[in-house]
Image (cartoon, helix red, strand yellow):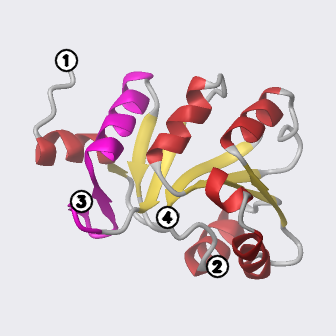
Amino acid sequence: MTIELIRIDDRLVHGQIVQGWLKVININKIVVVSDEVANDQMQKMLLSMAVPSNVDLEIETIKDVSGNALDGKYDKPKTMFLFSNPSDVLDMIENGVGVKSVNVGGMHFTNGKKQLLCNVSVDEKDIEALEKIHRKGIEIEGRVLPADDRIDVFTVIEKECRLNNG
């Protein structure tokens, strides 16, 4: 499978994705993975307008993207998967899709969340999903753009949220 990047960013497709990530890692396809967006024609139309014409965009449910990945649909093009939250990433992993690393690029602060990094805020559900991903031996790295330093997000969670990961 040629998944170049699995990214959690609650804004999905935006300038940092198009101007930063696509050009640096030469992506041919973006797959937005969201049950909510897959069932919202307006959001689908808006996202399609944000993607350059030379990049394919697919918007899939978690179940569909898992099946497609396992069937080899993403074996050829250099693909970026975009998720709005870590629970959806965990669902895809638990559906059998092999993942080595997850980039956390943007999880914005809302009431009830704790800010970990300038661009990453989490609630208990996020922490639980990220912990499960981490326990599967998957790297969880935080950075906004490819040239930024990689930050081990789970180490920050352990420090800031005092998790017992034993």
The answer to which of marks 1 and 4 sits earlier in the sequence is 4
Which residue type does callout 2 highlight?
Gln
Left or right side of 93 for 49: right
Left or right side of 131 for 144: right
**Count of numbered marks:** 4
Instruction: Mark yes or no: residue 99 visible.
Output: no
Magenta-drawn segment: 110-136
Dot 3 surroundings within 10 Å: few (below 14), some, or many (20 or more)? some
| Contact (Cβ within 8 Å) of mark 4 with mark 2 | no
- Image depth: mark 4 or mark 2 in front: 4
The answer to which of marks 4 and 2 sits earlier in the sequence is 4
For the C terminus, the image quarter is top left
The answer to which of marks 3 and 1 sits earlier in the sequence is 3
Q: Which residue is mark 4?
A: 10
Mark 4 lies on a secondary structure that is: loop
Q: Is residue 154 magenta?
A: no
Which residue type does callout 4 highlight?
Asp
- Image depth: mark 3 or mark 1 in front: 3
| Contact (Cβ within 8 Å) of mark 3 with mark 1 | no
Q: Give the CA distance from mark 3 to mark 2.
A: 28 Å
| Image coordinates for residue 152, horizontal then vertical, percent | 32, 45
Q: Which residue is mark 2?
A: 19
Q: Give the CA distance from mark 1 to mark 4.
A: 29 Å
Mark 3 lies on a secondary structure that is: loop
Instruction: Mark yes or no: residue 156 visible.
Output: yes
| Image coordinates for residue 164, horizontal then vertical, percent | 15, 26
Residue 166 has which mark? 1
Q: Of 147 and 75, which appears nearest the observer? A: 75
The answer to which of marks 1 and 2 sits earlier in the sequence is 2
Residue 111 has which mark? none
